Image (tube, rainbow, N blue to C red):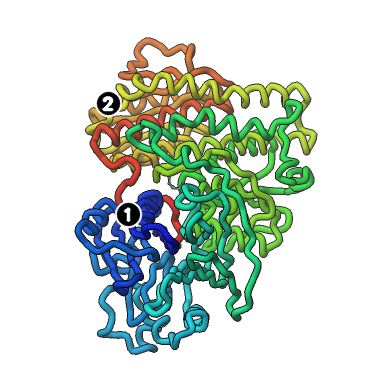
Amino acid sequence: MCGIIGYTGKGNAAKIMLDALELLEYRGYDSAGIALLGGNGMRILKSAGRVGDLRKRCKGQDTGGHCGIGHTRWATHGGVCDQNAHPHRFGRVTLIHNGIIENYKELTEKYHLAGKLRSQTDTEVAAAVVDHFYTGDPYSAIRRTVLKLKGTFAFAVLFDDQPDKIFAVRNVSPIVAAITPDGAILSSDVAAIVPFTPDYFVLPEFHVAALSPAGIELFDLSGDREEIVWQKADWDVGQSGKGGYPFYMEKEIMEQPKAVQETILPRIRDGRPDFSEEGIPDRVLAECKRICVIACGTAMHAGLVGKSLIQAMIGIHVDVVMASEFMYNDPVVDGETLVIAISQSGETIDTLEALKFARACGSPSISIVNVRGASIARVSEYVIYTNAGPEIAVASTKAYTTQLAVLYLLTARMAAARGLWSEKTLEGFMQELKRVPDVLKQVLQTKEEIHRLAGAILHARDVFMIGRGLDYSILLEGSLKLKEVSYIHSEAYASGELKHGTIALITEDTPVIAVVTQEKLKSKELSNIREVQSRGARVLLLIKEGEALEEGEGLSCVYRLPRMEDPFMVMPASVVLQLIAYYVSSDKGLDVDKPRNLAKVVTVE
Ligand code: AGP
């Protein structure tokens, strides 16, 4: 969490950083700030609030200069206020930080900092420690500081007497850097770099990058120079804008047919699923005895769909574990457990740490990641990239459906590798998968109808969502989406579980969204719907086109989903749930893309 930027060169550093901070704002948006180092010494401008507030704060101030660092914050230590905004300055050192310094209290004591700090942040303590060790050699000060720190960090540091230079170091939290046509830039992620150049590198952990207008040098912690390993970003700048939509979330929902198509098509050869580009040997898919999916939030919900598919079609046991709980539940993974890590950003620290643990236990691993070169992709044995393009809205949409697309492909490849399906079954499955983009387009063409349906829950305080099997899995995601962007309390329940307690909350007019897409569960699901209706619930039903509903099933609203084979119905149904959440949020006048308290990339545990 937190976005960091640094620029040194011939350009106007303040302008470059403010523009970049807007692109990075999805990483945190409690406060923002910049520091400029130039002829007039160090100038720091920062304020609680959004980058827009910082821009206002900069108006009329001296913002000239060609070297600076900037930050957009997601608060961890210390509340949201001007003093706690980054950059932090102590003595001759000014720095920005993404991560958490766990031993900041011990360091405060050890270096007698009590009474000298102006903020409540762990970051200011780190600035003070760097200053303590600084005797004119930035590398030595950084090295000695890093050896004292416990926790995660990505720092960009300015020293008063090192004009035009930015120093960066990291552990776990990401930093990427690049040469621009007129200088050098660093950032938390490539989003802020692609407007300048597609060529960038990931700063290796515990290495120091020194940026100057002449370029970038890389050193290990003992001061030895190292070669930079360059990569190419494949996101073009055009993909990063809102494309005429009022919010990124709507744009990203609308992009799903293309995103899913681009995720599926390159992995189909002669009609069969193919992971030869990714170098995944069939033995990895054929020999594992069980699968453990680790992920958080939306990515974890994608894993739940994968579990249902794989258990039903391959017949092997799949666990889906919240990555944040994985380490604390004495995980049992071994060489026979295929670990699948799912993450849009590829930087979620809980998923990353869980994956590292599993690898240390000898588990083969595949990660499903959207951001090229992200930490999870690098740690994993094999990586399958979802080709969703940049996902900027905090609420994940196209990342989810592309993760599902990869899970369908994996299921099919696993079945083929194990010789479980006939050619005809495989062909039928792949044909249906290829239909998904068109079916999603069909749903998106009905977005105004979905907008009207969303009106039914606009003023609700609580919304319940019910379904069974695969329907339940996608409702967990639908409910998360509604909560995070509309702030309406919502719970997804396996419909059969309602009677064991929660049905007590259903009263006259309680809105209930029910999804019924699985033939084998239909009659049970419809009975559960009747149960809530007879307690007064107002039901919005998502059901396949052409499914008969009996008179008296008295449903207030019904949305007809385009027909697919049952295992694929989660795709169109998920998009409807995303649109419902989106319209409720936008009709409430909320900041859809940046819901309160959240950040897009969760790099703290
Ligand atoms: C959902 O809309 C959220 N953005 C969140 O749950 C997200 O899916 C989760 O934080 C995991 O992120 P990742 O995919 O980048 O690992």
Quadrant assignment, res 244: top left
Quadrant assignment, res 33: bottom left
Q: Residues within 10 Å of mark 2 (few under 14, many from 20)?
A: some
Figure label count = 2
Residue picked out by circle 1: 29
Residue drawn at the location 53% of the way across and 50% of the way down: 197
Where's residue 150, x and y in %? 48, 76
Q: Residues within 10 Å of mark 1 (few under 14, many from 20)?
A: many
Amino acid on which the number 2 mark rests in the picture = Ala
Cα separation, mark 1 vs mark 2, equals 31 Å
Where's residue 373, x and y in %? 59, 53
Quadrant assignment, res 437: top right
Where's residue 445, x and y in %? 42, 19
Q: Secondary structure at mark 1?
A: loop
Please give the label number shown on residue 456.
2
Amino acid on which the number 1 mark rests in the picture = Tyr
State whether residue 69 appears in this view: no
Q: Secondary structure at mark 2?
A: helix
Q: Is mark 1 within 8 Å of ligand 1?
A: no
Q: Earlier in the sequence, mark 1 or mark 2?
A: 1
Please give the label number shown on residue 336.
none
Residue drawn at the location 56% of the way across and 25% of the way down: 436
State whether residue 188 appears in this view: yes
Residue drawn at the location 28% of the way across and 42% of the way down: 591
Q: Nearer the viewer, residue 20 or 148?
A: 20
